Amino acid sequence: MAAASEEIKTGILIGGRNHVTKIEERIKNLENILRTQNLTEKDKSFAKELLIKMKKSLKGEY
């Protein structure tokens, strides 16, 4: 998430990889898990907090 955030801020890939795309994919994966899986409340809470952090990283705020 830190690498994606830095890429957003600078426009420069970190380590020659596109971390923004990876975070976008992980957000879709996690949202799908939240929609389709029977998670505990603790797991749901953790996943939602992680989503917030990942989305912030795509705004350059992580």
Image (spheres, grey):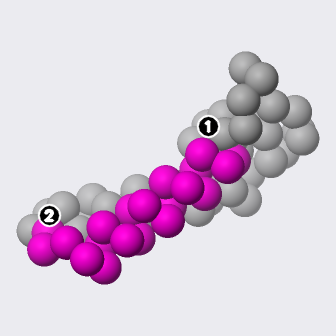
Q: Secondary structure at mark 1?
A: helix
Picture quadrant of residue 4: top right
Q: Is residue 46 above or below residue 41?
A: above
Among numbered discs 1 and 2, the one appearing first in the sequence? 1
Q: What amino acid is found at the position of numbered circle 2 in the picture?
A: Lys
Residue at point 66% right, 34% down?
3
Please rate how many residues cluster around mark 2, counting C-alpha atoms within 10 Å: few if below 14, some from 14 to 19, many from 20: few
Q: Position of residue 10 (x, y in %)?
A: 88, 39
Q: Which residue is mark 1?
A: 2
Q: Position of residue 54 (x, y in %)?
A: 54, 55
Residue at point 55% right, 55% down?
25
Q: Is residue 57 above or below residue 10?
A: below
Q: Position of residue 44 (x, y in %)?
A: 23, 69
For the N terminus, the image quarter is top right
Q: Position of residue 23 (x, y in %)?
A: 58, 50
Look at the magenta stretch and give its main secondary structure: helix
Q: What amino acid is found at the position of numbered circle 1 in the picture?
A: Ala
Residue 33 among magenta residues: yes
Q: In the image, 29: left or right of 56?
A: left
Tally the numbered discs.
2
Q: Secondary structure at mark 2?
A: helix
Point out the stretch of residues depicted in magenta: 20-39
Picture quadrant of residue 13: top right
Residue at point 30% right, 67% down?
33
- Residue 14 is tagged as none
Please rate how many residues cluster around mark 1, counting C-alpha atoms within 10 Å: few if below 14, some from 14 to 19, many from 20: some
Q: In the image, 16: left or right of 29?
A: right
Q: Which residue is mark 2?
A: 42
